[in-house]
């Protein structure tokens, strides 16, 4: 390929990042700013100009899906399959396999039933959920925390051990011993083993470093210390490292990822070149406004490059089923002749939410594919339950009743599974793993009920056959289909039309998010979901949801208020801020030392004491709430207040932009200010 063609369509900063040589490079930039584009173009360009042998490139990322996307983009850039692109685990395993083969070592068995082993080690313990213990152990391994250091490290990180003090470290030890005894390794061991080989054998390390001498990492905000250690081992002394990431998209903290590794990259790496990109090429200005609102204005500036598009929508539905049907309808409406279904996606917070949507789409005749993973049906508990439900001779109806009973009685004992995280629900006591487990089982129960209502002679094997068909009904897995994914699974991807469903308290933020750090991660997740959209964004929630057989009232996500304000703002014809023009303006103003408010803006009643007071008040409220000022009230509303000078709530309510919530929240303040200004 002609090198110049590979640089075509890159802006100045992107060009710098793609072609700069020397030093490790880090690109720190927001969603849709072209980080992945720059990474793949850099590889292709360096190959084209002869700086790189494509067979010596290793491109890393964190999920299999993201690795697939990376490979696809490299292929589009003419790379075919010479470049190795994969996940840390995938590459580590390939290297270990090869080494074992070369040395005639019998490969260890990979432990796929880790959960069962941990559960056995714990034994029967009331109020201890083995999945929580397992996640906590995985966090410690990912953070390179030795068993004896666990308590201290967990305290520092604000984590609560699911076991009494001192026991988790012991259990980590016992788990390691048990794996050795049975000659099995788990996925994290693969990374640790790969690191050990590289550290212990200098010749081997030199060979690996020669083979993968150009290192690239996408989504670097998701790296955990164990993976980082492996990256260091792969890299040796080389500075041929290129990483890109966005701190606002760090969504794997629960899993041990440490975004500080990205934030501090330049400090740790002498001679590192840092490039930031502020232009957004993916989304319309309207969608970026929503994204900024989701982060409560904390995101860096993303300068929109796409022309204006439709104002995003927010819909509420009476039930989860009507929501799913509504989403299906909207998908059909947005699907013009000649469009690809794959230009649309439905995103949800948890796997269990995928099921009703998938069914509604299938019912509406919309081809659908679940991205990356099998949803709740792939979970361990559902597989186990299916195995026993599907036994020939099993009394399906009886087993189903037992399953529903156990879900119900569990919900009586410890609160309802049906309302994960709803306020005042005793589910608050349930562990995250237990909530997820029950949601998955509830999703299964719903499927079984449906099957039982369709088959005049329901049976276990009949159920299995039906479920297989339903799953295969994710029409044409390779064909054109609407994509269904969780927020986590959607990272790095993009679609013209994005539907985000189930925006309820308990899902967004997820019920178990309690600490400031967890809630901040939830907001980033919403930001990730919103920034997947290119031209249309549709948000929805349902005020009732059925879990198993029980209907439960739901509350809207607390973040929807901000979303609604942003939408109202956009509807009133708000022009998203042209940051470039703003920057030029502020530079000019600084240059001429001109007073900021020169009175030239004839739209704002300069010198109007009421308007001034309202503005000052608004910026105080905005600061306190950490949101952009326009989310409190628009200039237009403030102008109307200054003009009409409302002294009662009734008068204030007549002003556009003042809804019941804002009236309640800010009404007294405003009336007081108006009265004061009248003397
Ligand atoms: P994310 O943080 O979501 O992973 P990203 O920073 O990796 O986003 P990309 O996926 O590389 O962003 O780019 C977003 C979209 O913008 C892509 O469709 C890409 O092709 C397009 N794009 C990037 N840079 C430019 C450019 N200079 N001109 C036109 N389109 C661009
Ligand atoms: Mg990307």
Image (cartoon, rainbow, N blue to C red):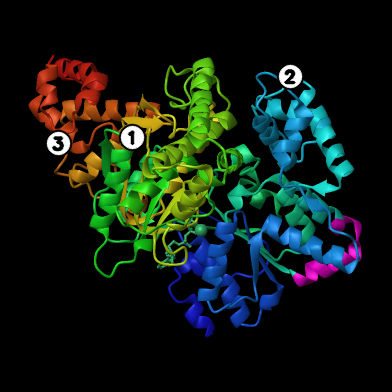
> Which residue in the protein does label 2 denote?
164
Image quarter of residue 141: top right
Q: Where does the N terminus fall, quadrant-wise?
A: bottom right
Q: From the image, give the main secondary structure of the stretch colored magenta.
A: helix
Question: Is ligand 1 closer than 8 angstroms to the Cβ of mark 3?
Answer: no
Which is more toward the observer, 80 or 262?
A: 80
Q: Which residues are magenta?
A: 197-211
Q: How many marks?
A: 3
Can you tell which quarter of the image residue 58 is in? bottom right
Q: Is residue 137 magenta?
A: no
Q: Point out the tag, 1 or 3, that comes first from the N-terminus.
A: 1
Picture residue at 54% right of the left edge, 82% below the top: 3
Q: Residue at x 74, y 34 (%)?
A: 118
On screen, residue 289 versus residue 213, left or right, reads left
Residue 241, numbered label: none
Q: CA distance from mark 1 to mark 2?
A: 38 Å
Q: Going from the N terminus, do you reach mark 1 or mark 2 first?
A: 2
**Mark whose residue sits in front, 2 or 3:** 2
Q: Position of residue 137 (x, y in %)?
A: 72, 35
Please, what secondary structure does the residue beneath circle 1 have? helix
Please, what secondary structure does the residue beneath circle 3 have?
loop
| Left or right: residue 566 compared with residue 446 | left
In this figure, which residue is indicated by the disc labeled 1?
Answer: 560
Q: Quadrant of ligand 1?
A: bottom left
Q: Position of residue 504 (x, y in %)?
A: 38, 33
Question: Which mark is on residue 605?
Answer: 3
**Residue 277 appears in the figure:** yes
Mark 1, ligand 1, within 8 Å: the answer is no
Q: Nearer the viewer, residue 94 or 218?
A: 94
Quick check: 607 left or right of 107? left
């Amino acid at each position: 390929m002609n090198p110049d063609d590979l640089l075509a369509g890159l802006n100045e900063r992107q060009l710098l990042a793609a072609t700069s040589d020397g030093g490790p490079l880090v690109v720190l930039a927001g969603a849709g700013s072209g980080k992945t584009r720059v990474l793949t173009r850099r590889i292709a360009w360096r190959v084209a100009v002869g700086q790189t042998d494509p067979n010596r490139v290793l491109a890393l990322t964190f999920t299999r899906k993201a690795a697939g996307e990376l490979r696809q983009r490299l292929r589009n850039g003419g790379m075919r399959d010479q470049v190795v692109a994969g996940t840390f685990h995938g590459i580590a395993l390939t290297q270990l396999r090869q080494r074992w083969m070369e040395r005639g070592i019998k490969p260890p068995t990979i432990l796929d039933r880790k959960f069962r082993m941990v559960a056995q080690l714990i034994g029967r313990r009331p109020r201890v959920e083995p999945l929580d213990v397992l996640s906590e152990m995985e966090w410690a391994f990912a953070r390179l925390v030795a068993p004896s250091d666990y308590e201290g490290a967990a305290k520092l990180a604000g984590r609560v051990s699911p076991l009494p003090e001192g026991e988790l470290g012991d259990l980590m030890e016992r788990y390691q011993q048990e794996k050795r005894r049975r000659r099995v390794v788990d996925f994290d061991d693969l990374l640790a083993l790969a690191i050990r080989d590289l550290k212990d054998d200098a010749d081997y390390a030199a060979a690996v470093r020669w083979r993968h001498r150009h290192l690239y990492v996408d989504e670097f905000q998701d790296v955990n210390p164990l993976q980082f250690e492996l990256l260091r081992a792969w890299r040796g002394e080389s500075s041929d490292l290129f990483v890109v990431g966005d701190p606002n998209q760090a969504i794997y903290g629960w899993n041990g990822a440490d975004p500080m590794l990205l934030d501090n990259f330049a400090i740790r790496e002498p001679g590192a070149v840092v490039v930031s990109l502020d232009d957004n090429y993916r989304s319309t200005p309207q969608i970026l406004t929503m994204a900024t609102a989701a982060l409560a204005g904390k995101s860096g500036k993303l300068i929109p490059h796409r022309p204006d598009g439709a104002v995003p929508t927010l819909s509420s539905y009476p039930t989860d089923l009507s929501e799913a049907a509504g989403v299906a309808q909207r998908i059909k409406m947005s699907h013009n002749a000649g469009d690809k279904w794959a230009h649309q996606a439905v995103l949800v917070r948890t796997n269990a939410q995928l099921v009703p949507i998938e069914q509604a789409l299938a019912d509406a005749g919309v081809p659908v594919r679940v991205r990356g993973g099998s949803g709740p049906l792939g979970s361990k508990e559902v597989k186990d339950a299916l195995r026993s439900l599907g036994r020939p001779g099993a009394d399906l109806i009886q087993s189903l009743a037992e399953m529903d009973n156990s879900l119900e009685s569990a919900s009586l004992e410890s609160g309802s599974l049906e309302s994960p995280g709803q306020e005042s629900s005793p589910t608050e006591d349930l562990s995250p793993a237990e909530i997820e487990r029950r949601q998955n089982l509830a999703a299964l129960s719903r499927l079984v009920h449906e099957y039982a209502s369709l088959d005049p002679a329901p049976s276990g094997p009949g159920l299995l056959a039906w479920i297989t068909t339903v799953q295969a009904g994710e029409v044409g897995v390779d064909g054109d289909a609407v994509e269904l994914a969780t927020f986590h699974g959607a990272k790095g991807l993009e679609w013209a039309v994005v539907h985000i469903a189930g925006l309820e308290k308990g899902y967004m933020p997820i019920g178990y998010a309690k600490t400031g750090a967890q809630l901040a991660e939830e907001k980033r997740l919403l930001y990730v979901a919103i920034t997947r959209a290119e031209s249309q964004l549709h948000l929805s929630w349902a005020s009732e949801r059925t879990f198993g057989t029980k209907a439960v009232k739901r509350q809207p996500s607390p973040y929807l208020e901000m979303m609604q304000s942003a939408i109202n703002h956009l509807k009133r014809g708000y022009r998203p801020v042209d940051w470039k023009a703003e920057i030029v303006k502020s530079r000019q103003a600084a240059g001429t030392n001109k007073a900021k408010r020169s009175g030239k803006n004839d739209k704002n009643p300069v010198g109007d004491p009421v308007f001034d007071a309202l503005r000052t008040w608004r910026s105080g409220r905005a600061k306190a709430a950490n949101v952009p000022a326009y989310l409190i009230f628009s200039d237009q509303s403030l102008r109307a207040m200054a003009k009409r000078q409302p002294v009662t709530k009734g008068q204030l309510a007549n002003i556009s932009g003042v809804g019941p919530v804002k009236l309640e929240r800010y009404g007294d303040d405003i009336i007081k200010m108006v009265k004061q200004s009248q003397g």
